[in-house]
Image (spheres, helix red, strand yellow):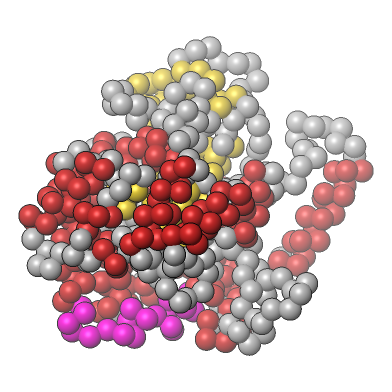
Amino acid sequence: MTYRNYYYLSLLLFILTILMGCSNSKHLSCKNLPNEDVLKNETYAIRNVNIITMTTDNKVIKNATLVIKENKIFSINGTIPEDAKIIDAKNKWLIPGLVDMHVHNLADINFASDYPTKGATLFSDTQDFMLLYIANGVTTVLELSARVEHFGQRNEIIKQKVIGPRIALAFLIDGGDGSGNIANTPEDGRQSVRIAKAQGYEFIKVYSGLNIETYKAIVDEALKNHMKVVGHIPNAFKGRLEQAFVPNFDMIAHAEELSKQSKDLRNEDAQRFAKLAKENGTWLTPTLTTMQRIAEQTHSLDGIRNLPSLKYVHPLMQSKWLYSNHYNNETDPKRIARIDSMVDFHFRLVKAFKDAEVPIVAGTDSGVSGVVWGWALHDELELLVKAGLTNQEALASATRLPALWLGIEDKTGTIEVGKYADLILLDANPLDDISNTRMISGVFVNGQWIDKKVLDKMLLTLEKKNSCNLGKDQYNWKKRKAY
Ligand SMILES: [Zn+2]
């Protein structure tokens, strides 16, 4: 069936549903369903399941029964309600839905010249995009370069037109003479923060081009507006890193921000950076997977070409990553050697931060070429373990800890009664081997159960749609301004 036929069939079904007066409300909801196989707001009982709660006491509850009612965890080892749908989870493991603390989501965008009333020139299907997250059990993300379109995406999810993760939005402020949200004086910096607050952003992201005074004013104004600050360490702090650690600089967005500050990438530097972060209460999102992918691309694009998840990536991004890849185009032996040594240093840096007891959270920088939304978080967990985190600590870095940083620890991040049912059912125990987080049997996204069969079906549909669009002009990065 073509996509258009499918659309008309969906429309017909929708009209029929309305004509039937929604008489059978249990099976035919008046709401638009993103997928006919996905049931909403049902009561579920997961039986015989091993629950990795991810609470601070590292509690694991074996052979338990967990009941989900109205999108929340209703009971653990309580009675099973009569109307509950039973999911038998013998020998399976339940973990909280995962959080990616550093993403760049694809959203509608305008590549052509503006005129009043003209909106986006390239539309992306929000469900197609969000599928990448939910197929991988990612149920919360922090968007670190948020713009107005991301509010629209988030609303689609909240209105249940799309199944997707919870999304927190950070407003990026840079300095210099580029485009975007630019501030080059403390007054402009403070005003940018107030505008972000007024527009509804929850966090501030500081960026590389800010000067020292403006950076400090932004972080201070954010504190006054109860907004946490995450981001790059501006280049202006080169040689005086300690000055960047001011109150309310709450999280470093990449390990790279620190390796840029080290001349010879020695362990002593890693320990010094960890001490600064610890004393200031600044957390770290290492984004190890990004640097590893970048390092790969400086050598060759074969890694991207052979990614099993590439076929699910929007065709425009596939085009950009493969045919306009600046990491690959602008490579030289010196650069390759430097990046390779940074990859090595970042592992040692993570270990130093762990030893200094600085909280480490999992983030991927998904959207950077070769870093595929959803899949990349599992890559990151494996790299964090390789760097020295235990499997339990790696899981905490993508569940309890990010929920705490985001201020939603009463809603998600652990498996406890009263929290939202953001859960992943796994075929094997991730405490034995962290790569078992990939063994997904099904996910609960805000209480909606989507089992593996349904996820696979949705992925297959997306793969077909992407392959139909590959190579078309509008999905050609080099021609993106031409329509
Ligand atoms: Zn980023």
Image-based side of 60 in relation to 120, left or right: left
Image-based side of 103 in relation to 167, left or right: left
- The quadrant the N terminus occupies is bottom right
Image-based side of 429 in relation to 100, left or right: left
| Position in image of residue 148 (x %, y %) | 62, 59
Q: Residue at x 52, y 22 (%)?
A: 418
Q: In front here: 326 or 15?
A: 326
| Position in image of residue 464 (x %, y %) | 58, 68
Range of magenta residues: 318-336
Per the image, is 287 magenta? no
**Which quadrant would residue 5 be assigned to in this image?**
bottom right
| Position in image of residue 451 (x %, y %) | 53, 42
Q: In front here: 207 or 394?
A: 207
Q: Main secondary structure of the magenta part?
A: helix
Q: Residue at x 43, y 83 (%)?
A: 324
* Extreme-top residue of the structure: 79
Per the image, is 323 magenta? yes
Q: Residue at x 12, y 50 (%)?
A: 271
Would residue 378 be visible to someone looking at this image? Answer: no
| Position in image of residue 200 (x %, y %) | 60, 48
Q: Residue at x 87, y 49 (%)?
A: 15
Would residue 260 be visible to someone looking at this image? Answer: yes
Asked if 286 appears above or below 65 in the picture, the reply is below
